[in-house]
Image: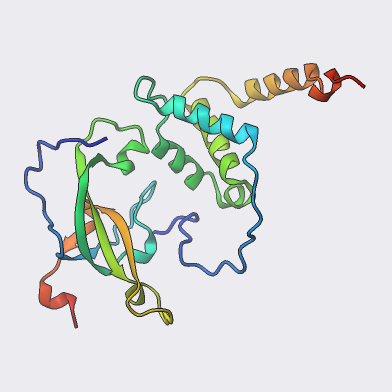
Amino acid sequence: MTLKNANQTQLRFKARDPVLVLDMDKAGHVRTPFYVRRKIGEVIDFRGYFLNPEELSIGNTAGPAVALYRVRFMMKDLWPNYNLDRTDVLCIEVYDHWLAPIANDEARP
Amino acid sequence: MRGYHDIGGDESGPIPMAEQPWQHWEKQTEAVRNLLGDSTRRVLSLDELRLGFESFGIDKYTKYSFYRRRLEAMIDSLEKKGFFTRVEIEQELEDIRARWVDPDSCKKA
């Protein structure tokens, strides 16, 4: 189901934008696993607007719909002592409100 | 905040690779869940169900199988919404067990 979102005409992120995943310390049903929180990744693409599962989980079906992005992380950035292929990546879908923009020069050491 | 279900990346030890046959009651559970969540009924969304088994306690979560978690969370939620009580379900189960006959008993000896 793809929804249109009247409130959000302009997407905050585009492909290749570096993003920081927020640690929102939010109780209840969230779909952002702990291991990507506070990590820096790169937006792959926008996947559409969806009703927020955090709201759906408590029966709020009225919206608004939120933007969902695919974000890519280097596996070596997610796991300490990652000893497999250093170029391995993890792709995961993250909702807009869990992402913060960061400047390009902060993203790459 | 990290839910007890949010275990991606944790050490698990060896993973048992035996094929698990899909049991009839598991298919029924999933079928009922789909009907309850479809766009004409909207009785119970998948995210409500997820919140249910992500918050009903780690003891149940680790003890129950994938479909048993869903079944128990579904019963919890339907009870909370006033469709029936656990006591009524238990009574119904008892009645059905009492009149149950082994399907093999209709085969010729």
Q: Which residue: 62% across, 68% down?
A: B14
Is B32 placed left or right of A1 in the picture? Answer: right
What colour-coding does the image apply? rainbow
Residue lying furthest left:
A10
Quadrant of the image for the N terminus of chain A? Answer: top left
Quadrant of the rendered image containing residue B72: top right
Vertical placement of residue B80 versus B46, above or below: above
Q: Which residue: 21% across, 52% down?
A: A97
Of B20 and B95, the residue lying toward us = B20
- Label count reads 0
Is B88 placed left or right of A93 in the picture? Answer: right
Of B98 and A29, the residue lying toward us = B98
Quadrant of the rendered image containing residue B68: top right
Vertical placement of residue B41 versus B65, above or below: above
Residue lying furthest right:
B109
Q: Position of residue B11 (x, y in %)?
A: 54, 70
Quadrant of the image for the C terminus of chain A? Answer: bottom left
Q: Which residue: 29% across, 31% down?
A: A61
Q: Which residue: 24% across, 30% down?
A: A62
Whether residue A67 is visible to the viewer of this picture, yes or no, is no
Q: Position of residue A25 (x, y in %)?
A: 33, 57
Whether residue A14 is visible to the viewer of this picture, yes or no, is yes
Q: Position of residue B10 (x, y in %)?
A: 50, 67
Of A15 and A52, the residue lying toward us = A15
Q: Position of residue A94 (x, y in %)?
A: 27, 54
